[in-house]
Amino acid sequence: QVQLVESGGGLVQAGGSLRLSCAASGSIFSIDTMGWYRQAPGKQRELVASITNSGNTNYADSVKGRFTISRDNAKNTMYLQMNSLKRDDTGVYYCNTNGILGLGVTFASWGQGTQVTVSS
């Protein structure tokens, strides 16, 4: 079983910055892709950014140039640096990851979510 713990959310004014963290723990052998998703009120959950274990990144068009995803493979931790935040970035941000457990079983897990609120 894999646990994902997110942190770093909060309330920030438009134009400000936040840094989210997601730490994975458990009997993990390896982690493949890690990603950040968000869900705004009344909207579907959407991919914000993802990063593979080799460092290849993918961003939603709405956050390109403002957000940066990174990961520390030694710590099984992923980060999302969010700059120039807009009100449309408001939502619950979820961490998602998949990989292989120590017994060779694949896994896919979601974090509990962290609230990001951008005020005008």
Image (cartoon, helix red, strand yellow):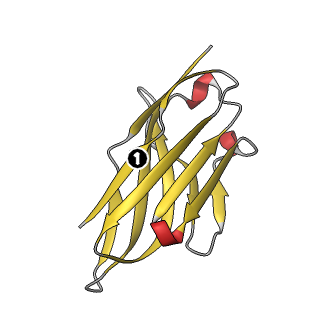
Where residue 4 sits, quadrant-wise, is bottom left
> For the N terminus, which image quadrant?
bottom left
Give the amino acid at mark 1: Glu
Where residue 9 appears, x then y in whole percent?
47, 34
Q: Residue at 31% x, 71% y: name it.
A: 107
Compared across the picture, whether 13 is left or right of 39 comes to right
Q: In this view, does 106 lie above or below 75?
A: below
Q: In this view, does 39 lie above or below 118?
A: below
Where residue 21 appears, x then y in whole percent?
49, 49
Residue bearing mark 1: 6
Asked which secondary structure carries label 1, the reply is strand
Label 1 Cα neighbours within 10 Å, binned few <14 / some 14-19 / many ≥20? many
Q: In this view, which residue lies farthest toward the top? A: 120
Where residue 38 appears, x then y in whole percent?
48, 40
Q: In this view, does 49 lie above or below 8?
A: below
Q: Residue at 64% x, 32% y: name it.
A: 17
> For the C terminus, which image quadrant?
top right
Where residue 19 appears, x then y in whole percent?
57, 41
Q: In this view, which residue lies farthest toward the right? A: 65
Where residue 97 sits, quadrant-wise, is bottom left
Depth check: give the residue in front, 28 or 86.
28
